[in-house]
Amino acid sequence: MNNQRIFSGVQPSGSLHIGNYLGAIKNWVELQNKFDAIFCVVDLHAITVPQNPEELKKKTIEAAKIYLAAGIDPEKSTIFIQSHISEHAELAWILNTITKTGDLLKMTQFKDKALIDFKEVDSAEEIGREYSKSQNLYLEEFKNWKSIFSKSYAGLFNYPILMAADILLYDTDVVPVGEDQLQHIELARTLARRFNKKFGETFVVPEPYIQKETMRIMGLDDPAKKMSKSATSEYNYISLTDDEETVRRKIKKAVTDSGSEIIYSDEKPALKNLINIYTSFSGKTFQEIEKTYQGKGYADFKNGLADILVKFLKPFQEKMNAISDEQVLGILQKGAEKVYLIAQEKMKDAKKKVGFIV
Ligand code: AMP
Ligand code: TRP
């Protein structure tokens, strides 16, 4: 254990799925043994897209239970709900005043989400896969910015500033996230440096931690799209709370490629994604999987994959169900009490530096 601090979070904005588990939460479980770890359920971020209030409450508790069932140990790590610590929003406001609009205009996640609203479609992929490849196309579209901005909310635009506040509030050294969040970490670094330069040394400049082997799990209904909480079809994802029947039904329906051989190849992106999932949950290599299913077809492979998933999810869900709402709220309350002390100190310092009377 070193004395470096890590901070990360997931939005309780939908059903957390096996992509969130493999891409984020599973890594946290390992990192908590090496770092002073803080994990947050970022509900303030979740409301940057419309949420049903009752549903948000349920999802917030569920996300925390998922952290615990995955193996985040409240004795080792601190877990808490973002909105319990008002300093996040307070620091975000101060950081707003040193963020240039141009800093935010670069953010591809905002562009994706704002364009999704503007075009009234479900995903950036639907707008055209070109968008994620070509900044120019984005810029073309953003010549339309007046009409795009008239439809999108300021919270979504300012989202990366709140994320910077989350990170800087705790003198975070390292931020473990998926590759899609790199730009946001870069902004947090810029804002830390800018604030320090303007007002004096206050914030630690954080480093991103992108696990190279972190796999992007793709949608079961379309291997060109990321598996996503906000997908409209439930056949896009396997939720961590899906029961056995649902898992088997979804895997059966998962798209596959032409041909019938079970081989791991870029030419078979749908199968490759399914083999990646198989590998991650079974510990078997893709060569071993190819061998197991030699001479067999997709039906056998899919049955095998569903078995592997159910074998992981059953005990996972049993652990989740064994935790009562009261228990998890108690843990989150304790977590908030712990981080509050750090947040309050840092906020006091930041306020003094900008010239507020404290
Ligand atoms: P989000 O679902 O966007 O709130 O992401 C929460 C965390 O899960 C981030 O660190 C993401 O990079 C990671 N993540 C989200 N979707 C996937 C996916 N399909 N595959 C791998 N990691 C993912
Ligand atoms: N924006 C992150 C995501 O969608 C979630 C997040 C919010 C986060 N605040 C954070 C991640 C601070 C790491 C650190 O995945």
Image (cartoon, helix red, strand yellow):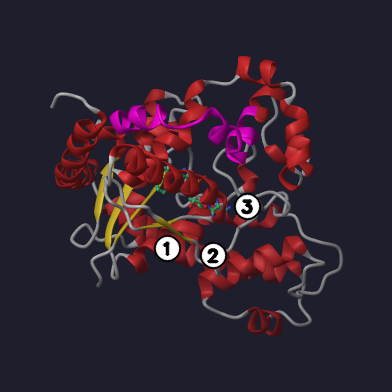
Name the front one of labels 2 and 3. 2
Name the residue that disc number 1 marks: 26
Q: Earlier in the sequence, mark 2 or mark 1?
A: 1
Q: Is residue 313 left or right of residue 293?
A: left
The Cα–Cα distance between marks 2 and 1, rounded to whole angstroms, is 10 Å
> Residue 233 location, x and y as percent?
65, 39
Residue 3 is one of the magenta-drawn residues = no
Q: Look at the numbered discs 1 and 3 and tell me whether their residues touch, using CB distance below 8 Å.
A: no
Residue pictured at 65% horizontal, 69% vertical:
275
Q: Is mark 3 within 8 Å of ligand 1?
A: no
Q: What label does residue 249 carry, if any? A: 3
Three-letter amino acid code of the residue under disc 1: Lys
Name the residue that disc number 2 marks: 214
Q: Is mark 2 within 8 Å of ligand 1?
A: yes
Residue pictured at 74% horizontal, 24% vertical:
143
Q: Earlier in the sequence, mark 2 or mark 3?
A: 2
> Residue 49 location, x and y as percent?
51, 28
The answer to whether residue 309 is above or below residue 184 is below
What residue occupies the far right of the structure in this picture? 259
Depth check, front residue: 51 or 42: 42
Q: Quadrant of residue 150?
A: top right
Depth check, front residue: 150 or 13: 150
Residue 101 is one of the magenta-drawn residues = yes
Name the front one of labels 1 and 3. 1
Three-letter amino acid code of the residue under disc 2: Thr
Secondary structure at numbered mark 3: helix
Magenta highlight range: 89-114
Depth check, front residue: 140 or 48: 140
Res. 2 visible in picture: yes
